[in-house]
Image: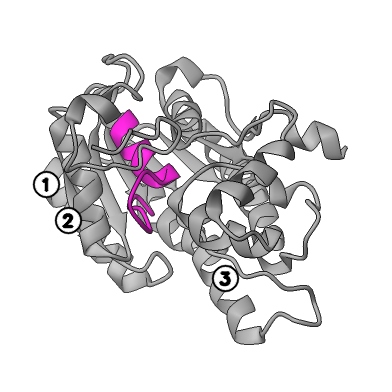
Amino acid sequence: MRRHDRRTGERGMNDDLNDWRALLPAASSRLAGKVALVAGGGSSGPGWSIGKACCATLARHGASVCVLDASLDAARDALDAVQALGGQGMALQADVADAEAMRQAVHAVMQRHGRLDILQANAGIGKVGGPEEIDMADWERIQKVNVDSLLVASRLVLPIMREQGGGAIVAVSSVAGLRYLGYPHLAYNVTKAAVIHFARMIAQQYAAHGIRANTVVPGLIDTPRVRHTVARMFSADDFDQARAARDRQVPMGRMGTPWEVANAVAFLASDEAAYITGTELVVDGGLIGKYA
């Protein structure tokens, strides 16, 4: 049997449960009684994406997790992880930029659980290219998925949270929204910068209603999506060579794991962060300090 990759959890749900359970934080009740909607909660390939790790981590802390993804199979896979931990929730399929699909998804959450305490906005796409290379259709689609989706979701969940007397929104951006990291990724970088400021605006407008909004800003994270893109960026013959090159970019000497991002998400979603709103938590192994 192939050795388990502790950095990515690559063997997945059909392998020994204890292998990937060991990657999780200790179980707690810090989110007990809370209902979380994780948008972009599936994984684009075998292993653990940030969204999927967030689903499992939020469940580990006692939340009911509603997994939403453009792929129903990916949402169900993440829900399997939640249920394997003894958690509960549901799998939902929707394009995060589709207002009607999202309305139906939020309605389904409310029908099942009667409340919504946490919105974790994780969905994001990108395409390499500078201002002369990026196609306008790609630019518009990236804007819709990465930024417009936040407006769509906020319009749906903010009235619910306001009526409940509070809630937490945790968006996922990227260090690419803060720095130029050495290659042209214009649409992605610009939209990830917009994610940060969007959360800041929500935080200011809704603080008096007990609604907090913060952003987690990951650096270079070892996820299934990286396997599809990173080798091309480094012109490497194999993924191990590309991953080693990416590791060397980080002052700590390695890419981060989805679990390290998920732990930051769980903290900002919890009452332990009750006095934290309108800010960013960078999870990058020192990367943006290097480029400052």
Left or right of residue 121: residue 175: right
> Is 242 part of what is drawn in magenta?
no
Q: Name the residue under label 3.
A: 142
Q: Magenta span covers which residues?
A: 40-57
Of residues 102 and 86, the one nearer the viewer is 86
Q: Which amino acid does label 1 sit on?
A: Arg
Q: Does residue 177 sit above or below 250 in this rendering?
A: below
Mark 3 and mark 2: Cα distance apart in space: 26 Å
Q: What residue type is labelled 3?
A: Ile
Neighbours of disc 3 within 10 Å: few (<14), some (14-19), many (20+): many
Q: Mark 2 points at which residue?
A: 108
Q: Residue 43 carries which label?
A: none
Q: Do the residues labelled 2 and 1 touch (CB within 8 Å)?
A: yes
Q: Residue 8, percent across and down?
A: 42, 38
Q: Residue 40, percent across and down?
A: 38, 54
Q: Which amino acid does label 2 sit on?
A: Ala
Q: Are marks 3 and 2 in contact (CB under 8 Å)?
A: no
Which of the two discs, 1 and 3, sits closer to the camera?
A: 3
Q: Residue 138, percent across and down?
A: 59, 80
Neighbours of disc 2 within 10 Å: few (<14), some (14-19), many (20+): some
Left or right of residue 98: residue 172: right
Q: Residue 43, percent across and down?
A: 35, 53
